[in-house]
Image: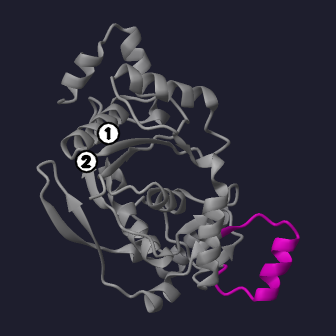
Amino acid sequence: MTKPVFRFAPSPNGRLHLGHAYSALLNADFARRYNGRLLLRIEDIDTTRCRPEFEATIHEDLAWLGLAWEEPVRRQSDHFDDYRAAFRTLKGRGVVYACFCSRRDIAEAVACREAETGEPWPRDPDGAPLYPGTCRGLPAGEIERRIAAGEPHAWRLAMGALQKLLPGPHSYCRFDREGAEERVAADPWRWGDAVVVRKDTPTSYHLSVVVDDALQGVTHVVRGQDLEAATDLHVLLQALLGLPTPLYHHHGLVLDPGGDKLAKSRQSQSLAELREAGASPQAVRERLGF
């Protein structure tokens, strides 16, 4: 039988904090208990925010925690051609369309709809307004002209077409710390016409993660509860691209004293700062329950 494969996949856009440490240690713990493999993946498709020095500190922090992983490490920015190939498959199936809207365009369109109806516009699981479909019905000629003119554009899933092509029901298998498994329903439609290729890069988080997990043979995805809703969309993409669906475990988040999740954007205390303050790897492990 093939060994189970786990992966820890941080983005090098800041220093790792205790939340990252928990996820990395939990992946390592599962890999040890399942006699599996542990991979490290650098998710750096955002080339404007991801920096080499942060990638170097990821290796440093994880090694300080006593973790080891297989080489070579997959860096997403080295594999844009893989994501382009997956996008061509989606495009060939007729389930994506070009979108020329900026965030401001979307916000203004949604505000107009809310003013007209007096009702709040539906949001996706991340709290962003669902795309109102402004570019969904653009004539092919206009799309080609605007792309040829170099107009910035993203590509979105056409969920209406997908509901006819792959109506479901969709589901995936999740597992807990004791190894028990259960099948749970997935609802990808709540994401609306999600972006699969961004304006500034030939992929998106959703597309690249699904492609990477398949190419790396990942069998068990262990990540935070803040990404649980994204799994619904990933299950749909896996079905569209003919890729296997791993088992999933969505762990609880490490919170700060105010009850908010730790985040680089809020400058949560980093592992490097803990180390400089005299914390030991063992103390960090014990603090996180390992």
Q: Secondary structure at mark 1?
A: helix
Q: Amino acid at mark 1?
A: Ser
Viewer-side residue, 1 vs 175? 1
Q: Is residue 57 left or right of residue 77?
A: left
Q: Is residue 5 magenta?
A: no
Q: Residues within 10 Å of mark 2 (few under 14, many from 20)?
A: some
Residue at coordinates 63% horizontally, 47% vertically from top-left? 77
Q: Which residue is mark 2?
A: 251
Mark 2 or 1 closer to N-term?
1
The span picked out in magenta is 135-154
Q: Which quadrant would residue 247 be assigned to in this image?
A: bottom left
| Residue bearing the label numbered 1 | 23
Say which quarter of the image contains residue 167. bottom left
Residue at the right extreme, as displayed:
149
Residue 172 appears anywhere in the view: yes
Inter-mark Cα distance, 2 to 1: 8 Å
- Residue at 55 percent across and 72 percent down: it is 131
Is residue 260 something one can see in this rendering? no
Badge 2 vs badge 1, beta-carbon distance below 8 Å = yes
Q: What's the mark number on residue 177?
A: none
Residue 142 placement: quadrant:
bottom right
Q: Quarter holding the C terminus?
A: top left
Q: Is residue 143 magenta?
A: yes
> Along the horizontal axis of the image, is 3 left or right of 132?
left
Expressed as whole percent of the image width and height from the top left, the position of residue 237 reads 47, 72
Residue at the limit of the structure toward the top, as seen here: 278
Q: Which kind of residue does numbered mark 2 sit on?
A: His
Q: x, y (%) of residue 126?
A: 42, 58
275 or 62: nearer the viewer: 62
As helix, strand or loop, the secondary structure at mark 2 comes to strand
Colour mode of the rendering: one colour
